[in-house]
Every structure is written in C-alpha cells, then in structure tokens.
Image (spheres, grey):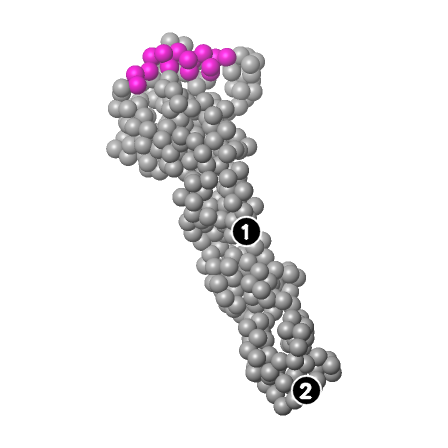
Amino acid sequence: MNEFTNQQLNSLVDSALGTLKKDRDKEVLRRRGGINTKAQTLEEIGNEMSITRERVRQIEKAALTRLQGKSDPKDPFAAALTGLIDSRGGLLSLESLGQAIKLDDSLRPHVIFLVKINPEILFVDRNDHHSAMIADASSFGTEAIKSIHDELVGAVRNSGKPAKFASIYKLIDGPHSEETLQEMAQASRYLCELDGNWGLTTWPEVNPKSIRDKIYLVLKKTGRPIHFSEIADKISTLAANPKKVTTQAVHNELIKDSRFVLIGRGIYALSEWGYRSGTVADIIEEILKEEKMPMNKDEIIRRVLARRQVKTTTIVLNLQEKPQFKRIEKGVYGLA
C-alpha cells in the first residue's frame, strides 16, 4: 500500500469522478468527502446549491452507486487494498489503513472515497462505539461488526483487569482471527492499550487521566512503595498522558485517596498490597490482635517492618511507652 504516492491517489480520484456526466454530482461528492476542499454538511451544500439537504443526500448516494458499478476491483489500488484487508482477517481500522499507506491527513478523504466506490469493500463510518472501519463486504455487515465489538468489550470487562491481547482473544468464541479482533480493539472507543496491556478506557491502569489515576499507575508499575517526590517525577515520564505535576499536588492527592497508604516518611504504598493506614502503635496493636497472644519483640519488629518503613527504635519506643502494650517478660510484649 505504501507504494502509492499522493499524486497517484489524486489521479485515481479524478479519474473516477471524471466518469460522472454531471458536474453537480462531482461537486457534491467532493464537498461531502472533503476532497481537496473543506468537508461540508448536507445543509451547507444544499444552501449553496439552492436545493434541499435531502436532495443533496440523494445525489450523493446515487453518484456513489453509479461509481460502484463502474469500479474495477482488479485495479492496482483496489487489489492492494483487498489484500491488506484480507491479511487482517477481513476487517481493518481506517487508522491502520492510513499507517499502511503512510499518507498525510490531507489525503485521507481521497482514500475514503476510493473505499466507498469499491463494491467489494464495506465502509463503516465512525460512531459512538468505534472509529471508522473498512471490511470485506462478503464477510461482514454493519450488524456483524457491531456484534464483534460488543463481544470484545464484554470479554475485556469480564476479565476485570488489563491483560495482553492474546489472553483476551482466548476468552472469545467464534471464527474471527486474532488480527481481526485486534483491529476492532484499536478502533474501539471503549478499549485502550498501554504498555501492551488492554483494558476499558475507564480503567486508570491503561488510561490514567486524573493525578490520582496516574499515582496509582506509577505505584502499580513500580511494584514497591516509593516517596511522593519520586512519584511526581515518574508521572512526567508516563507513556499515557504524561504531564508535569508538582510534588505538592501529588502529596495532596495521596492524602485524600484511601488506595494509598503512608508507610514511612513521605513513602506511600497501595492498600491492595496489604498495607493499612494508622500509626506504628496501631500496627503493633493490629499484629498482637491477629496473633491473640504475647509475642517476642523481634517478631513484632519484623512484622511491623513488613507493613511500615520506620526505624526499629521507633517500634521499640512504642512498645515501651504506649499504654496499650505491656511487657509480659523479658523481650515479650502483649496487649494491656
């Protein structure tokens, strides 16, 4: 596909339009498609031509139908396009097509026009569910594409967490290839990919938007507790939505969200890692209640350090000075 130059595509469009007898038909198709001009609505064209918007729609539809009847599916561009679609299992996002042809945005309307006049190819315009797509007309219809999209989004939602696409593909029954479903995923407005993992666009792990979402993603990716200043630095290097933030803004969000737990001086962890909020004394009390019996000081220290990044002397001072603890015997403490 990338062998076709801008000049060749312009020539193909001009050649196809040249087969139409009426200048009005050519003008409507150019304006509606934005071919070498600004794309216009039915109403805008109707007002300039002194006809109704419905009449403009009829002219456009009839002209495209006539061109489809004259289209040669064996011409080099049509053949290359069909081959590309077949290589993706019969379904291709317009974005993927644009990448394959390596065109600038100004010639995107030309490609869409050439797709629309090919009777063997189905063009599905962008909608609330996905961006524009093209498909093998003998294998797919608009309802089939919608069904594939719904099934794919449902599988991702049911997985409950981001996953590699190969894993998601295994959750879907049906005849469609992994390449077909991946094209659908790339076009979907409900799915998003980050670092090779796919998920819903509402999941911060793949589509972080707020500072809190980005904090969560940084901690998740790092896999260990880190200082809030380091979190701020890492946010600016995220692959998704990188943005420079202040350490104060990050610290403020860490304090407000229960997903984040302060476990040391400025050091935060995710609560889902098993960390709980509270003072060192609270943690010691929790551990003694879990054990339901007095414990050796060294074992208490070991368990506290697994949940908090504090000095050993801080733990010892809490055992000795807090009224909720008492020394049972040398080196052994329990609840008062």
Rendered location of residue 60, percent (x, y): 47, 16
Q: Which mark is residue 327?
A: 2
In this rendering, position of residue 116 left or right of residue 12? right
The single residue placed furthest to the front in the displayed view is 293
Give above or below for 89 relative to 19.
Answer: below
Name which residue lies at 52% across and 68% down.
226
Q: Is residue 234 visible?
A: no
Name which residue lies at 47% across and 31% down.
148
Highlighted magenta segment, given as a residue range: 58-73
Q: Is residue 303 visible?
A: yes
Which quadrant would the C terminus be assigned to in this image? bottom right
Q: Quadrant of residue 35?
A: top left
Disc 1 or disc 2, which is closer to the eye? 2
Q: Earlier in the sequence, mark 1 or mark 2?
A: 1
Q: Nearer the viewer, residue 302 or 211?
A: 302
- Magenta stretch holds residue 244: no
Principal secondary structure, stretch drawn in magenta? helix
Give, as a three-letter code, the residue at label 2: Arg
Q: Nearer the viewer, residue 287 or 18?
A: 287
Which quadrant would the N terminus be assigned to in this image? top left
Rendered location of residue 22, percent (x, y): 41, 10
Give above or below for 229 relative to 317.
Answer: above
